[in-house]
Image (tube, rainbow, N blue to C red):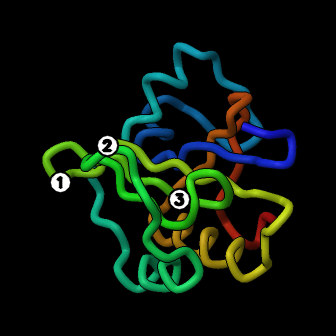
Amino acid sequence: MAVWQFGGYLIANAVAETRRIVPGMTVSAAVRDLISEWDNSTLPSEELCQLRMFLPAGRSWSKDLEVLGDLGSTCVTFYKENHIVGSIYARFDLRTLSIEVVGAALKFASAMGCLLLTDDNKVISSSISDW
């Protein structure tokens, strides 16, 4: 990832709670591997539609990876196994980022009850009021 990009995994609150992970923490790589898996929650349809308005379907390198946006820039990816979400990753490219895209991504994450686990293992709240 380039220095002008920022990203991380969306972590379900239920998973974070069982591991006692809260915003502001830094987790180890071992814990990161345990919590980056999704908890099979249903994706919020209204917020997903809003996200798709700003990040249309992009090109994917795998049938198991749904991409919204551009893999080389701002995107949200959903890795699926047998049509069940396994992980969700969001990347923001600061060269082209708009407040509308950030807002749609945060509304989506908040509606799902997620935390963001950054690439350097820091845990951040997805609540818009915390930003």
Q: Which residue is drawn at 71% across and 57% down?
A: 92
Q: Where is residue 35 in the image (x, y as percent from the top left)?
A: 46, 31
Q: What residue type is labelled 1?
A: His
Q: Which sits in the foreground, 1 or 15?
A: 1
Q: In this view, does 117 lie to the left or right of 50?
A: right
Q: Which residue lies furthest to the left in this view?
A: 82
Q: What residue type is labelled 3?
A: Val
- Per the image, the residue denoted by label 1 is 83
Categorize mark 2 by other alpha carbons within 10 Å: few (<14), some (14-19), many (20+): some
From mark 1 to mark 2, how far is it between C-alphas? 9 Å
- Per the image, the residue denoted by label 2 is 86
- Per the image, the residue denoted by label 3 is 76
In which image quadrant can residue 112 be found? bottom left
From mark 3 to mark 1, how far is it between C-alphas? 17 Å
From mark 3 to mark 2, how far is it between C-alphas? 13 Å
Q: Residue at x 48, y 79 (%)?
A: 52
Nearer-N-terminus badge (3/2): 3
Secondary element under disc 2, as helix, strand or loop, is: strand
Image quarter of the N terminus = top right
| Mark drawn on residue 21 | none
Categorize mark 1 by other alpha carbons within 10 Å: few (<14), some (14-19), many (20+): few
Q: Residue at x 52, y 48 (%)?
A: 89
Q: Where is residue 104 in the image (x, y as percent from the top left)?
A: 61, 78
